[in-house]
Amino acid sequence: MKPELSVVIPVYNEEAGLATLFARLYPALDKLGISYEILFVNDGSRDRSAQLLADQFRARPDVTRVMLFNGNYGQHMAILAGFQATRGNIVVTLDADLQNPPEEIGNLIAKMREGYDYVGSIRRERQDVAWRKHASRAMNHLREKLTHIKMTDQGNMLRAYGRNVIDLVNQCSEVNTFIPALAYTFARKPTEIIVEHEERAAGESKYSLYSLIRLNFDLITGFSLLPLQAFSLFGIALSFLSGALFVALIVRRFLLGSEVQGVFTLFALDFFLMGVILFGIGLVGEYVGRIYQQVRGRPRYVVQAILEQKDDFGNVSSISNARE
């Protein structure tokens, strides 16, 4: 029988905190009194995470499934792979670092039962360093202006999705995407709730500053053409201004004669315009690079193995090789 709830958890080098996650997650889900499955997606961990996940599968094979990637493809690719394998009517995504308490899953499900098909979450008191809090708020504001996708806390992955949303997401084939925003575009009735937020149970964040910047580029370029359009309008405005400046310089030369003053001002203006041009080339390159990644048609991820209970008689499929 299909479970009512599927929980998808991407895992990357979380050896230090997995035992605590198991100790809190399974009791929290058992208390809900509904059928569920937990799908761990090991995203090419280099520590003992894969071994610990396999041990947990052997301990609770009735509700545990483990998907093993052959390399590191990123958190969002791991979630997409999990979505493809889920069977529940409600799918919840949860990070493995326990910053989002597993006990909050029940609140998401209760909200889904009110008729919503997408429930996001807002961290009540975010337990992160100051620069990440401020950068996240700034990106939330910029993203909403550019994409018109209304998510109060875009970086929080504790979210619940209805089966209708999951099926639509599974039909997409983007190489670079942002799962919460993609699902939001398909939801008929989305909403948000406030959840608790805790400090990381163990280890450190796997997102560097560069990774966060790349992720936000994926979000903006994947859901809006406004940056390109704004830059085109800016270029048109500069063209008119440069034409007006040229006419003014010609008139000034005829009226006042040749001058050598203002050389450094012209240099500064040239450097500014060169910076604008380089920025524009880089912006176009971001879009073109994503087009290139999409059209070459390589697998978004490679599943090396899946640990799951095969049937009601206890037979286990040790593993199936697959590609996506």
Image (tube, rainbow, N blue to C red):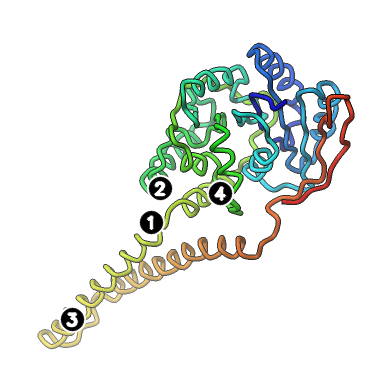
* Residue at mark 1: 226
- The disc labelled 4 sits on which kind of residue? Thr
* Residue at mark 4: 177
Query: Mark 3 or mark 4, which is nearer to you?
Result: 4
Residue at the location (49% across, 28% down)?
A: 119
- The disc labelled 3 sits on which kind of residue? Val
The answer to whether marks 3 and 1 mark residues whose Cβ atoms lie closer than 8 Å is no
* Residue at mark 3: 247
Q: Where is residue 85 in the image (x, y as percent from the top left)?
A: 70, 38
Q: How far apart are marks 4 and 1 (CA)?
A: 17 Å
The answer to whether marks 4 and 1 mark residues whose Cβ atoms lie closer than 8 Å is no
Q: Distance between the residues labelled 2 and 4?
A: 13 Å
Query: Mark 3 or mark 1, which is nearer to you?
Result: 1
- The disc labelled 2 sits on which kind of residue? Thr
Circle nearer the N terminus (2, 4): 2
Circle nearer the N terminus (2, 1): 2
Query: Extreme left residue here?
Result: 255
Name the quadrant containing residue 264.
Answer: bottom left
Q: Is mark 1 on a helix, strand or loop?
A: helix
The answer to whether marks 3 and 4 mark residues whose Cβ atoms lie closer than 8 Å is no
The answer to whether marks 2 and 1 mark residues whose Cβ atoms lie closer than 8 Å is yes
Q: Say which mark, if any, is on residue 9.
A: none
Q: What element carries label 3?
A: helix
